[in-house]
Image (tube, grey):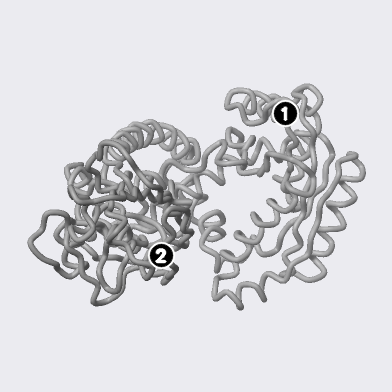
Amino acid sequence: MEKLVLNTKNTILKHGLIPGGTGVLAGVSGGADSVALLCALNEIKQELGFELYAAHLNHGIRGAEADGDQAYVKELCDGLGVQLYEETLDIPAVAKAQGKTLEQAAREQRYAFFERALEKLGARRIAVAHHMEDQAESIMLHLIRGSGLKGLTGMEYMRGNIIRPFLDLHRGDIENYLAAKGLTYRTDSTNLDRDASRNRLRLDVMPYIAEHINPGVTDALCSMAELLKQDEKYLDDMAREALNKAAVKGGYDRTELMLQPKPILSRALRLALNREGVYADIERKHIEMLFSLLAAATGSSIDLPHISAWVSYDRICFGRRQEKEDMETYFRFPGKTLCGKGIFFADEFKGDIIKSNLVGYMDGGKLPFETKVRTRREGDVFRPYGAPGSKKLKAVMIDRKIPREEREKPGIFLGNELLFMPGLGISDKVKVTADTRRIIRVQYTEI
């Protein structure tokens, strides 16, 4: 078995990249790396017990040259007996419409294409042909752009459903394999365009370093990345523990978070965003904004890529803030009253009353037909149980530090007077007394 194929098999087994019986989709551009990847995977698919498919995306950038790549990939897959999924897109038009660089649009559309291919073919893994030189170039780019520790750890062998079986191989290993097999491949002319940062790095900077400073620069950078991965994992574990400790209903205790040293806090905040499904486009400036938000007055908020963050008393919260949803309906007692995202259950009650702000026990004789269930409005008032008089409902909520996102729960009102709201309890005006003949018990359940 050739060195490249053996190395690929060992990498897959060592890192658990392909469970038995899994369908693997190889991204094949027609270039040397992807051709070698497809052929190597084809050699070991039976031994490792996985199904192999290929996917090719014509980006619509290089005209006839790109069409030639597509025809070549189809011929290669037909010869290997590998099913091919292919599409043609106009990436320049997409980039212009979305206001993105050609490189950014191509990357995003390529991975969206891979997901469509996975669904069509029933595969579970996307194999890409990144190797050690790609790894070293990525690390150098991140370093030049001022990346944090995470960026210097390089690419993972597996992230999500994307696997990189060639990450322990040099470009020379790939070229030797292709030559030994007599395999041809296509050359993308855009890879010679020095206007692209990665191309300039690959064609000029890395060769200069190898010739004049360190001939083993690729191995050195990849080795550094492996060491930094250990440090990053340790810090990530600490950040996860800190975030879990700070978790409270609806968010995280911001005082608890602010006790953490900055390296842990920054990772904890990124992890909190990850838990909300946000992985891309979060930059250092956004984390700095969150640092400031942690110490801001309650009610302060910021908008980040794909998500919002706000502070509510002792919590920092992430998500999409809900707009107020006005609703109004008559209160049914006894019975069920459906109201937006919840239900009020009312029944006649006999027994010992347990004081609770979540369950209301009211004098049924003080609940006229006009009683309604609705959301709060400007001018509403509330006289808490045992209070000497009424106050504005908003003031009561502020006094009790009711989070803003929980103030829009529906309540039971008579005119502008709140009679019961989960979390606030009942009004003194409908409390049960010795003269009460009929007790109505009310409970609220969110749907």
The residue at the far left in this view is 388
State the residue position of label 2: 322
Q: Amino acid at mark 1?
A: Val
Percent across and percent down for residue 364 are 31, 56
Height in image: 184 above or below 189?
above
Percent across and percent down for residue 328 are 42, 70
State the residue position of label 1: 5
Q: Residue at x 32, y 37 (%)?
A: 244
Residue 285 in view here: no
Q: Quadrant of residue 246?
A: top left
Given contact means CB atoms under 8 Å apart, are the residues at marks 2 and 1 in contact? no
Q: Residue at x 43, y 53 (%)?
A: 334
Task: From the viewer's side, name the closer residue of 245 and 71.
Answer: 245
Q: Nearer the viewer, mark 2 or mark 1?
A: 2
Q: Quadrant of residue 46?
A: top right
Quarter placement of the N terminus: top right
Q: Amino acid at mark 2?
A: Gln
